[in-house]
Image (cartoon, rainbow, N blue to C red):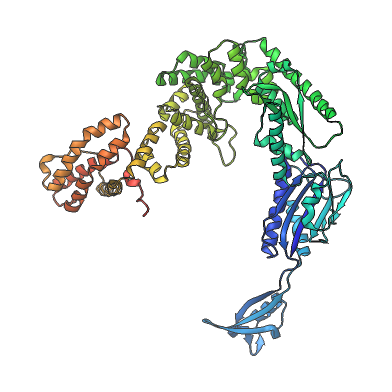
Amino acid sequence: MADLLIELGCEDLPAASVEPLANHLGKALFEVLKSAQLGSSEPQIFATPRRIAALFADVGEQQADQHVERKGPAVAAAYVDGEPSKALAGFLKSANATVDDLTTIDTPKGEWVVLKQVKPGRSLTDLVADAMPDIIKTMPMPKRMRWSDFDYEFLRPVVWLCAMHGAKTLPLTVLGLTSSNKTHGHRFHSPAAIELSNASTYNDVLANHYVIADFDKRRELIQTEVTKKAESLGATAVSDAALLDEVTALVEWPVIVAGEFEKDFLEIPKEALIQTMQENQRYFALLDNNESLMPGFITISNIESKSEQTVVDGNERVIRPRFADTMFFWEQDKQKKLSDHRKSLGSLLFQEKLGSVGDKVDRMQVIGAWLATQLGEPVEDVKLAASLCKCDLNTEIVKELAKMQGICGRYYAARDGHNEAVSAAMEEHYYPKQAGGPLPESGVAQIVSIADKLDTLVGIYGLGMKPTGAKDPFALRRAALGVVRMLIEKQRDIDLSELIAQSVKSYGDRLPSDFDQATLLEYITERLKGYAQENGYSPDAIDAVLAKSLSNPLDIFARLQAIDEFRSTDAAESLAAAAKRSGNILKKAKRDQEQSVDVSLLVEPAEKSLFESMQKIEPQIASDLAQRDYAKAMTATSSLRSSVDEFFDNVMVNTDDEATRNNRLALLSQLNALCSCTAELSRLQPKES
């Protein structure tokens, strides 16, 4: 048993591919070794711009021989007049065996011919050599290339192959390269080939030659050193997982370098400067204690320069023209008010059949005004915010930096003197930008956001362009979930069916006349179901509430919360069973409509008691439902438990007397309606014991 190392050395790989390629190599080799029973340890993965490698501990050199037993035909069918039958001859040929190799076994079905063979174990070299072509073929690469006059393909030219099993070189030929026990260190600090004495020394040897090969360790080091450097400058570094991963994939020997830029550039919105630093230069921006941008940055060099200042000067020189371009765009945008761009939105296409972005904004104003009236928000502020919220799409900065849409609108709206709620809506109406992301804070922004998302949902869904599989070009799933979250988390009391109808109306004749609005409501409801389950509500509880054909998310969640409380009571399971039993009786009797109960026909004490109990609590429940105090309504319902149990124990519903039977069915119908006032209790599953 010894450590196994496989390393592919490449010309510089694209940052996004470094870790996925290495992970694929490790995972695929692990499956090969595990299947061959030569190793069971998870690999240590190494990934840098110039190499992908996997190191496995305690790997065997040779598979053990396997004793294989193959069952042939029954003895009765194996021989004809003492000679092998066609069935036996075919079996022997397929196994490359003779009659002398056979034996027999007794089974419950009789005697059978059996061939016992020894299958020689394969060597580690053969197994890896056979596996590598398929492993390379299935590696995740956006585009493969050829180099020199070879027919081989890889993401970048592969220039060396190191393969070792313990102290021995594992003889392999991959992509035209013959394996050796040699690797390479840092391109500049240690360019010569390095001979490894053992596979297990790989990581330590590279560290001595200016390569931190472990991706996670290199990432952790960069994060720690960036934080330290920022603190030494009295700042906090702006960082995220994507930036850290990209920088880690670009260097083998990270060296922290700090630089500065002119304070005049701080006039530009800080988000634009941060985006430019991160996406164009992979710099870490710096914020002071007040979250204001500082005129400085941190970058990661891949070399220990003898003249660090030269590296600093080079990075400062590169960032200046980019900032100068952004400053130019900022100055150009200053010459117009945000509202001056409103007319030009007519030239931006939203969707061919649904019109321009200007048309969309017109519809958003209509829906926004309706929502503001329903929710008690300032109508004029909502209409103004809806009118302006897409105007920054025609500004110079957004044309250059697309991610600044909304953010620039917020700056420009504030610069033009609009109030805070309107200005904030420019950016926040795009919220949430990702699953679980923050929602708009102000009421104005929430309404504009809902209007925007609903307009997209209605228009695209109305044209029949429903999301299929992973394809969702208009992000309808995110839009639907965003609407659901805002209505629930921001306590907005709006019925979705009404909201959809208003949006459809705002489209005029742009949508097909046969558009079934119920299908869109169903689509949004599916997103609501998923959201409810993520928040801990059980599928049967969700099903029980939605069985009431509800379309107000806030109301639905109030009912779900009440059911959660109700299920903890002793009466819950009994009443759910009663609701199911009464529902089944009514279904068999085909009683779809409720009719009044004739008190004079109530003869049994149990049915009289149930009717009186229902009459007593019905007004209170009606009041509770009107106030959406569903927990209180269900508590009141639970007081019927003993009366319901007594009724089913002592009263026969389907009696021979038709008038009595119909009256008892009417009583059950009222009971069922009362029990299911909050949700269809019959759909609740019994509690697990």
Q: Quadrant of the N terminus?
A: bottom right
For residue 583, side relative to residue 222 (left or right): left
Q: Residue at x 88, y 45 (%)?
A: 191
Task: Give above or below for 383 relative to 635.
Answer: above
Question: Image quadrant of residue 156?
Answer: top right
Q: Nearer the viewer, residue 101 or 464?
A: 101
Residue 480, percent across and down?
50, 33
Badge count:
0
Find residue 327 and report its horizontal and vertical position in percent.
72, 16
The answer to whether any part of residue 138 appears in the image is no
Q: Seen in the image, is 628 located left or right of residue 293?
A: left
> In the rendered image of this protein, does residue 322 appear above or below residue 204?
above
Q: Is residue 612 visible?
A: yes
* In the rendered image, the vertical position of residue 261 relative to residue 100, given as above or below: above
User: Which residue is nearer to you in this view: 266 or 116?
Assistant: 266
- Residue 358 position, x and y percent, is 57, 18
Q: Residue at x 65, y 18 (%)?
A: 394
Q: Quadrant of residue 613?
A: top left
Residue drawn 55% across and 32% down? 437
Q: Residue at x 75, y 63 (%)?
A: 2
Apparent side of residue 418 relative to residue 152 in the rendered image (left or right): left
Residue 325, position in %: x, y?
A: 75, 19
- The C terminus lies in which quarter of the figure? bottom left
